[in-house]
Amino acid sequence: MNLFGSKKDSDRADGSRLVPYPSGAVIPERDLGKTPVLEALHLGIDFGGLTAVDDFSLVVGKTEIAGLIGPNGAGKTTVFNLLTNIYQPTRGNIMLDGYSTAGKTTAQLSEMGVARTFQNIRLFGNMSVEDNIKVGLHNATRESLLAAVTHTFGYAKREREAHEKALELLDFFGMADLADAPAGSLPYGAQRRLEIVRALATGPKIILLDEPAAGMNPSETAELMTNIRRIRDTFQIAVMLIEHDMKLVMSICEGICVLDHGRIIAKGSPEQIVSDQKVVEAYLGKKKEGGDPA
């Protein structure tokens, strides 16, 4: 039984392969010689007497599409909360483009180049699609209260630039005709897509996508795969995703990390992950001697 629907290296769209990085990790060959966009070093967090994540170490290359998978409750979203400083780690360090994120607020982390979407859609439903994108552009268009009230020349100029940039991003995703529509009126798949566009508007170095294909139909999922590759190739940034759709993960991710009970049980290429017995057991349970799962 093939639980994950893997592809061979030669079948993958980008044709990349993982190669050793000096720290002992592996990254896409094209990212060798570049500072990794993200390094998590022995990361862990405790809630009371419970260890939710322990000894989590991962390197993500500059333009890598990375996957974080595992059974329900494995700690995947907790890892994303650690990487975005929603949670402060009990131990370990996080480096973004070579700089420590310790003590940074989530807003400061966004300015450093981390963007994220969530499992549950968090759009401003009563605002227009374009205005939701402008929220993502906020850091680039921030002005003083006086400038906003008096609409000085500089403010107006930046507003025009934000309008043009928002339409440019929407056009990239085939959504320019929806710019004036209320975000909450969009179909589910389009709302998911808008969340990614808004995250991209912050000018990130890495986007963390938490179950981006959740609730999507097959055609929407196929479009999502195409868009993730286009984001990586066009903007030359990294994408890291949590996803339960294994066909999507195995089709587009170059490096995959598998969590179970808050600890990494496997890391490697899709081909390595699908043949790892610990991964199969984490999803299906250990087999008894008779052959049935325990």
Image (spheres, rainbow, N blue to C red):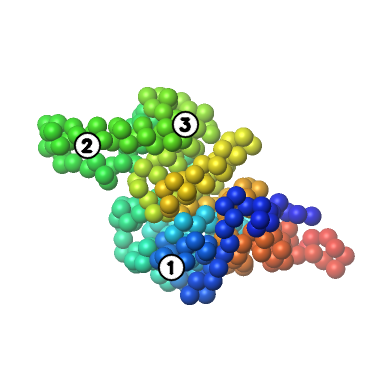
Q: Is residue 131 above or below residue 294?
A: above
**CA separation, marks 2 and 3?**
24 Å
**CA separation, marks 1 and 2?**
36 Å
Q: Which mark is residue 174?
A: 3
Q: Is residue 41 above or below residue 239?
A: below
Give the residue pinned by disc 2: 158
Residue drawn at x 36%, y 32% is: 167
**CA separation, marks 3 and 1?**
35 Å
Residue drawn at x 69%, y 65% is: 276
- Determine crowd level at label 1: few under 14, some 14-19, many 20+ residues with C-alpha closer than 10 A: few
Give the amino acid type for the residue marked by disc 1 in the picture: Gly
Give the residue pinned by disc 1: 33
Q: Is residue 100 above or below residue 106?
A: below
Q: SS of the residue at dot 1?
A: loop
Give the amino acid type for the residue marked by disc 2 in the picture: Arg
Q: SS of the residue at dot 2?
A: helix
**Where in the figure is residue 259, as x and y percent of width and height?**
59, 62
Residue drawn at x 75%, y 65% is: 286
Give the amino acid type for the residue marked by disc 3 in the picture: Gly
**Reading the chain from its start, which is encountered first: label 1 or label 2?**
1
